Image (tube, rainbow, N blue to C red):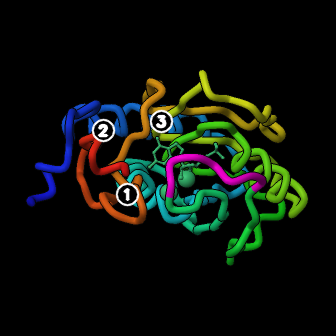
């Protein structure tokens, strides 16, 4: 079965995504153009890789790029508790503005741990830029650090979505748009 045939419905098309990514990147470039501390984009692996890649290409400032990895989800569609940082940033973020780039914020538990981790490493601010946000499912409150800002691509309804970096059991990350799988495939 071809990749598109696994998808029941599309939530955001490639064109909608690229328009929105451009808008966010323009906003970030504007917000940080006068800041003196360096700017580091930290993608949360693996899900943020595609969004991070598209986003940084549209940022009109000199920036650094790194990754961090937090494990919380197993191969299913429900979180299995407090995430653990299993691969840390390589760049020293002390005194720098960090923009954490996420694929999707669900309960907020991953972001809460990542933000406090980066704060403890001395980042001068921690902002969040998430492609999708599911505010209806928030359980853990997180606070930005310093002058940190919150950016989001789209508000996501309470479905388990795949594509544009997001997986189900490590598959479908390469789908260039966001959709919902056919129900029989979630079993
Ligand atoms: P949280 O810690 O906020 O509950 O979960 C964050 C992580 O769970 C996301 O970064 C993402 O990896 C995963 N996640 C949450 N909702 C979805 C979803 O609808 N689809 C996929 N593929 N992953 C999700
Ligand atoms: Mg993620
Ligand atoms: Mg996942």
Q: Nearer the viewer, residue 23 or 166?
A: 166
Which residue is at 38% across, 41% downward?
A: 161
Decide if ligand 1 comes within 8 Å of the CB at mark 2. no
Quadrant of the rendered structure where residue 159 is?
A: top left
Split into 4 quadrants, where in the image is the N terminus? bottom left
Decide if ligand 1 comes within 8 Å of the CB at mark 3. yes
Mark 2 near mark 3, Cβ–Cβ under 8 Å? no
Q: Nearer the viewer, residue 147 or 169?
A: 169
Q: Check the image and report above or below for 40 versus 58.
A: below
Badge 1 is on which residue?
Answer: 50
**Structural crowding at the residue carrying mark 1, measured as other residues with C-alpha within 10 Å and reported as few (<14), some (14–19) or many (≥20):** some
The part of the chain drawn in magenta is 76-82
Give whichever of discs 3 and 1 has the lower sequence position.
1
Badge 2 is on which residue?
Answer: 180
- Alpha carbon separation for disc pair 2 and 1: 18 Å
Find numbered disc 2 in the image and state the secondary structure of the residue it sits on: strand
Instruction: Name the mark nearer the viewer: 2 or 1.
Output: 2
Q: Position of residue 39 (x, y in %)?
A: 64, 55
Q: Position of residue 123 (x, y in %)?
A: 81, 56
- Alpha carbon separation for disc pair 2 and 3: 14 Å
Badge 3 is on which residue?
Answer: 132
């Amino acid at each position: 079965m071809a990749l598109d045939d696994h998808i029941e419905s599309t939530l955001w098309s490639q064109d909608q995504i690229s328009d929105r990514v451009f808008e966010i990147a323009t906003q970030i470039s504007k917000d940080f153009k006068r800041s003196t501390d360096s700017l580091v984009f930290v993608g949360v692996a693996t899900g943020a890789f595609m969004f991070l890649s598209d986003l940084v290409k549209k940022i009109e400032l000199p920036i650094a790029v790194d990754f961090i990895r937090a494990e919380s989800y197993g191969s299913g569609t429900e979180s299995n508790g407090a995430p653990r940082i299993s691969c840390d940033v390589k760049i020293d973020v002390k005194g720098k503005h960090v923009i954490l780039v996420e694929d999707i914020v669900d309960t907020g538990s991953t972001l809460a741990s990542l933000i406090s981790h980066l704060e403890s490493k001395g980042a001068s601010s921690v902002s969040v830029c998430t492609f999708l946000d599911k505010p209806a499912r928030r359980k853990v409150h997180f606070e930005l650090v310093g002058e940190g800002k919150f950016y989001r691509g789209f508000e996501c309804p309470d479905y388990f979505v795949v594509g544009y970096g997001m997986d189900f059991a490590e598959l479908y990350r390469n789908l260039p748009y966001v959709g919902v799988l056919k129900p029989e495939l979630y079993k």
